[in-house]
Amino acid sequence: MANTSIELFGKTLKNPVMNASGTLGYGKEIEPLWPVETMGAYVTKGLSLEPHHGNPLPRIWDQQYGMINSIGLQNVGVERFFGHYFPFFRSRRIPIIVNFFGFSDDEYIRCAERIKPHELIVALEMNLSCPNVKKGGISFGKDPEMVYAIVKRVKEATSIPVIAKLTPEVKNIGEIASAAHEGGADGFTLLNTMPAAVVDVSQMRMPLRGGLSGPVMRPIALRAVFEISKAVPVPVIGAGGIMDSTDALAFLMAGAKAVQVGTATFVDPYAIPKIVEGIGEYLTRQKCANLDPIIGCTHREDSGSR
Amino acid sequence: MNDREGRIESNRMVAPGYFLMEIRLRGALTRPKPGQFIMLRIPGTEVFLRRPFGIYRYEKEKLTLMYRVVGKGTERLARAKENEPVAVLGPLGKGFHIGPRDHYIVVAGGIGIAGVHSLIETLGQKALILFGCGTKEELPIIEDLAPLKPMVSTMDGSYGLEGTVVDLLDSQLKSLKGNSEIFACGPEAMLTGLKKRIMEERIPCQVLVEERMACGLGLCFGCVRETIDETEPFKRVCKEGPVFDLWQIRL
């Protein structure tokens, strides 16, 4: 049996597969189907300083190659998460990545400060797609100066490694990644959802504006993973339309050290365990002892067209 | 719980826009409770996400669903042919709780009958069934309930009482003695009207609500309803529901 484990920020994860934030509830909900520790790490729902009720309905819409969601970051708040939900992960010894966000710089900092280091916390994942209320709603993640400043302040507020989760809604994602890296980001998750909308032609109205996810995002995320993992010397976690183990391997080959699976779970609730198994089987078939020859292998033969 | 593979045994229109689908599953579901639902997927189609459907009937690996064509998913479902493969996840959600009462009243509006059909079969003769729809053209969808003598209202007055199913309920409430409980499923306007009508008597009432869903498992928080719980007002229809106490949800 091939070794599928990876090292991430000094911790060993038994495989490189995680859920994308917000797509596996608070962890326990999937347990009637499969144990959460099937994954290398569980990524929390986006947590905020105070509980957040999210957006009105509708919140989701089916698209042919993906879905649009506007959940609006509904969550119980960082305090209740650690009081009520974290003991489950502690008792089961499940590594977690804590995704968090704020609507102002202060909220990001205070939220990060509330998360105390713990051997099971692999990293904090900053959701940088959040609108900055104080600056008129412009997303933190679209302006390199804002990205640099917020990552720097969060880094000063915590000793836990910090992952910046970037939005694809930018002209030059490399520039944003460099700014986050200069600010001190220890890694990246690429990518978040893409702003999108639905028009109901029969009713002549727009029922939903939200974030697009699913297979339609995959080529965009793959390119970002490839370019940023080549350019910036920190781990990259790939996310965007990973539906099966072939997709997951594509991200690893493009340079991702780990992958996050989101929308696929809604199409097939067993997608994650199937991906974990498929990666192991691929390694065995290819006679690879571990993931080293796979991760970033496309960097070595970069002759594709731009 | 498993994701069960199955094949469509029959898929026929029972009234304009209403379909009844029978699915033969490979392997049994955990015995569903009235009010629970399944998530259905037709593999290899343009419909990306699964769709939730109330369990109309379940017997020995045979699952029956009733649906009305309302959008892309159900349009595709209506075109599904005999023997086509499907995947079924369920039973999901919390169903109805049947406590000891003198009377059980089931109120269904239109396709809302699909959500309470298995409850009606469980309650049998103990239930007073009130069904409301637009016109008498829709009545074939309750044909199999004839032995239980459902009372009917139609909006156009083409059969039974002219008016809504809440008007029909109003006509019956005065004659009921002892303690009653209402079970309801139907369009939002029906639930709002129902709440307004029984507000004064504060009759116990459980309602089955429908919402767009992505996962059906409580993972995505895409299908919430607002409740009076001040700490966590937005409850997931798929996980904390789809059956809610009428007096707990905001309408």
Image (spheres, rainbow, N blue to C red):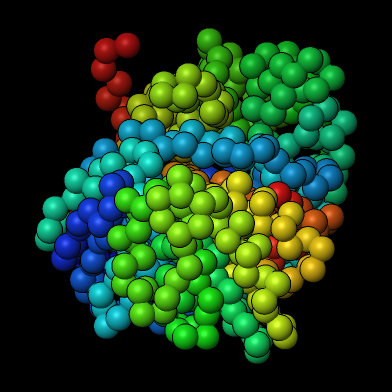
Q: Is residue A212 above or below residue A46?
A: above
Residue B93 horizontal/vertical position (percent): 53, 67
How many marks overall?
0
Q: In the rendered image, is residue A179 in sight?
A: no
Residue B111 horizontal/vertical position (percent): 42, 55
Residue A89 horizontal/vertical position (percent): 65, 66
Looking at the picture, tell me which residue is in the foreground, A155 or A170.
Answer: A170
Name the residue rendered at 56%, 52% in the picture.
B164
Looking at the picture, tell me which residue is in the foreground, B191 or A15.
Answer: B191
Q: Which of the 4 quarters of the picture holds residue A58?
A: top right
| In-image side of A209 versus B18 (left or right) | right
Residue A193 horizontal/vertical position (percent): 52, 31
Looking at the picture, tell me which residue is in the foreground, A132 or B45.
Answer: B45
Q: Is residue B242 above or below residue B110?
A: below
Q: Which of the 4 quarters of the picture holds residue A255?
A: top left
Name the residue rendered at 19%, 46% in the picture.
B79
Q: In the rendered image, is residue B117 in sight?
A: yes
| In-image side of B71 versus A110 (left or right) | left
Name the residue rendered at 12%, 58% in the picture.
B82
Quadrant (top left, top right, bottom left, bottom right) of the C terminus of chain A: top left
Q: Which of the 4 quarters of the picture holds residue A4?
A: bottom left
Quadrant (top left, top right, bottom left, bottom right) of the N terminus of chain A: bottom left
Q: Is residue A42 above or below residue A67?
A: below
